[in-house]
Amino acid sequence: MIELPQHNTAFCREHFLAYFENQVRRAIQDFRMFTPDDRILVAVSGGKDSLVLWEVLLRLGYQADGLYIDLGIGDYSVASREKAEAFAAARGATLRIVSLKEQYDVTVPELARSLRRPACSGCGLAKRYLFNLEAEKGEYDVLATGHNLDDEAATLFGNVLHWNLEALRRQSPVLEAENGFRRKVKPLIRLTERETAAYAILTGIDYIVEECPHAVGARSHVYKELLNQLELRSPGAKRQFLLGFYERGRAAIEGATERPEVRPCKVCGQPTVAEVCSFCRMMQRVGVDEVRLMTAAGVE
Ligand code: AMP
Ligand code: ZN
């Protein structure tokens, strides 16, 4: 059914599913991501990776709820939200939904227009902020994202290319809870995009195939393409690059940068290195008032 040159092997349907689930299990154990007692919030975009992650965690018997953030990106958000909702409904799973429009009366395209910045920067900031806020509000022990081996290898490549030591230090399959940040994990780091797509198809997961319209032409695509070309010539290189970094590279740069001091944002109380966090500053710049930011964050 599927050939995996990086492992010098091929699988039938049944054994591919077992292999896939084992790779997730292994990442969870090797990096001590969570235990069956932990309550997990899975950030789901409606795309294949995060829905596959949710599916596998449920199959493995973990307590996993979903979180969908409606960013207001036109038809793309409407369609991806439907996929996430249908997935949850079919499994009787709990899906939390946060709408940027409802909560802050602004959408990602509006943010980009007002700030005159690429949509992806505001979008990434909003997602990271809401992941932490929602995990905190719902008292989840850990927040899981669907980042796969290709995503993380491409990010690593970019971080190395620019020798961004601060980003390298933070690039990890597990970020421990500290200073108001909830624990963050990436259980799919041992699996490629091709493998998650195969798993989704073989288990009948209906996901949004289209990409976010803003992501077209993203730099990470170039890095992914480069790494895939390398992978063709040298099967296993991509995996070695990423997993070798986690096993040996990270420790070597651990003390290379200073850890900035973290404190609660004066407006919303979420952790930040500034007086006011970058999310609140961005929202204030587009006219969202302080009361709204406080109310949304659940502070009096
Ligand atoms: P991306 O940043 O779009 O590559 O997505 C990386 C991960 O973030 C996905 O695998 C999801 O776990 C999560 N994610 C992306 N978009 C959303 C969204 N709209 N709502 C909830 N989680 C998301
Ligand atoms: Zn804030």
Image (spheres, rainbow, N blue to C red):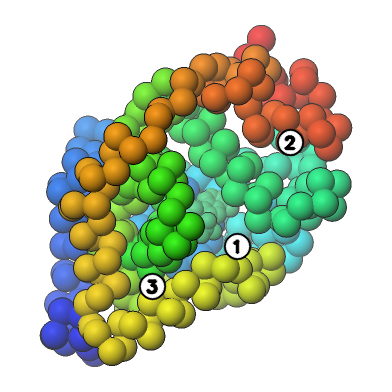
Considering only vertical position in the picture, is 201 above or below 239? below
Label 2: state its secondary structure: helix
Disc on the earlier residue, 1 or 3: 1
Please rate how many residues cluster around mark 3, counting C-alpha atoms within 10 Å: few if below 14, some from 14 to 19, many from 20.
Answer: some
Q: Nearer the viewer, mark 1 or mark 3?
A: 3
Q: As shown in the figure, which amino acid type bears the numbered disc 1?
A: Ser
Tell me which amino acid carries mark 3.
Glu
> How many numbered marks have been drawn onto this rendered protein structure?
3
Q: Which residue is mark 3?
A: 193
Q: Secondary structure at mark 1?
A: helix
Quadrant that contains the N terminus = bottom left
Q: Tell me what residue is drawn at x 42 percent, y 20 percent.
A: 179
Looking at mark 1, is its residue's CB closer than 8 Å to ligand 1?
Answer: yes
The CA distance from mark 1 to mark 3 is 18 Å
Residue beneath label 2, please?
A: 282
Circle 1 sits on which residue? 80
Residue at figure coordinates x 46%, y 20% from the top left: 261
Q: Is residue 55 above or below residue 92?
A: below
Provide residue 105's location: percent of width, then percent of height. 80, 38
Residue 35 at least partly seen = yes
- Crowd rating for badge 2 (residues with CA inside 10 Å; few <14, some 14–19, many 20+): some
Left or right: 23 in relation to 178? left
